[in-house]
Amino acid sequence: MRDLPRNLAWLTNMAISIIRCQTGFRYVPEANRHLPARQQEALDFLLAPPHR
C-alpha cells in the first residue's frame, strides 16, 4: 500500500507520454477533449507499437 501513490504517478506520467508521443497532441487538455468521444481511437493509441 505504501507504493500506491508512486505507482499511480507512474501510470499518469506514462499516459501523458503516450498522449504526447503517439497522438500528436501537444497539450493534455486538448487530448482530453478529443479522445473521450473516440474511445476506440484512444485504445488503438495505447495498444499500437511506438513510433520511431
Image (cartoon, grey):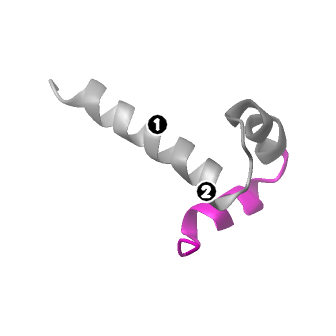
6 in relation to 14, above or below: above
- In terms of image quadrants, where is residue 45? bottom right
Q: Secondary structure at mark 2?
A: helix
- In terms of image quadrants, where is residue 47? bottom right
Which residue is farthest left?
2
Q: Nearer the viewer, residue 25 or 8?
A: 25
Instruction: Quadrant for the C terminus, please.
Output: bottom right
Q: Which mark is residue 21?
A: 2
Q: Position of residue 5 (x, y in %)?
A: 29, 24
Is 46 displayed left or right of 25 in the figure?
left
Q: Position of residue 38 (x, y in %)?
A: 82, 53
45 in relation to 4, above or below: below
Q: How many marks?
A: 2
Instruction: Quadrant for the N terminus, please.
Output: top left
Q: Which mark is residue 12?
A: 1
User: Bounds of the magenta span?
Assistant: 37-52
Residue type at numbered disc 2: Cys
Q: Position of residue 48 (x, y in %)?
A: 59, 73
Is 10 displayed left or right of 23 in the figure?
left
Q: Judge depth for marks 2 and 1 and give the one in front.
A: 2
Q: Residues within 10 Å of mark 1 (few under 14, many from 20)?
A: few
